[in-house]
Amino acid sequence: MMTFLDQLGPVVSVVLLVLIATVIGLGIIVFKMHGKLNKIETAYRRTFRVGRGKILEELITENLNIMEEASAVSKEVSAKMEKLESDMARAIQNVGIVRYRAFKDMGPELSFSMALLDAHRDGVIITNIFGGSNCSVYSKPIQDGKSDFLLSIEEKEALEIALSDKPNKIPEPLKKPTIPSMIAAAVSNNILAPKN
């Protein structure tokens, strides 16, 4: 009885045996490579493992997410700061006050003219004239450092003081906070405990 290989012929038999040997050899190589890959993965996990069983890659991804959130919050804070700066520019920042005696024989200097201006040199002049038994208060609008109304000598002086480099200033507008200034403010307001 003829075997299967004898029926195929000698050349085909040799080719078939070579193919079988090649497949077995490749299987052995794949098996060995799989073992080496497992060793590399184990070494990777052991090398890059950090606290609480997290892998460095997971920790980096987590930190990147935190940084993205912080960036979004920072952009929101910057936008709010810009709005505050814009609003503060419209707040009274420069004040000029002149006290005087409106009438010669009428007691102390209880009359005054006060110029209240914002960063754009817009605002109002308020004048109080004390006349013994009565008082009169007047206001005149100011646009870009000028008034369409006739100003008295005292009102002009108050306006000049407010427009000068050294007006009677109210507190300066908010400046952009720095991290140390925010921490100091938080510590002084008992929000954070002081560093020991």
Image: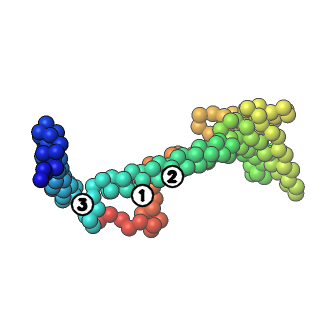
Q: According to the image, label 3 marks what residue? A: 50
Q: Secondary structure at mark 1?
A: helix
Q: Earlier in the sequence, mark 2 or mark 1?
A: 2
Q: Which residue is mark 2?
A: 73
**Mark 2 falls on what kind of element?**
helix
Above or below, 57 against 115 in this view is: below
The amino acid marked with disc number 2 is: Val
Residue at 78% over, 45% down: 126
Residue 59 position in % (x across, y down): 32, 56
Relative depth, front residue between 29 and 118: 29
Question: Type of residue at label 3?
Answer: Val
Tell me the residue that label 1 is attached to.
183
- Foreground residue, 110 or 70? 70
Alpha carbon separation for disc pair 2 and 1: 17 Å
Mark 3 or mark 2, earlier in chain: 3
Which amino acid is tagged 1?
Answer: Ile
Question: Is residue 139 visible to us here?
Answer: yes
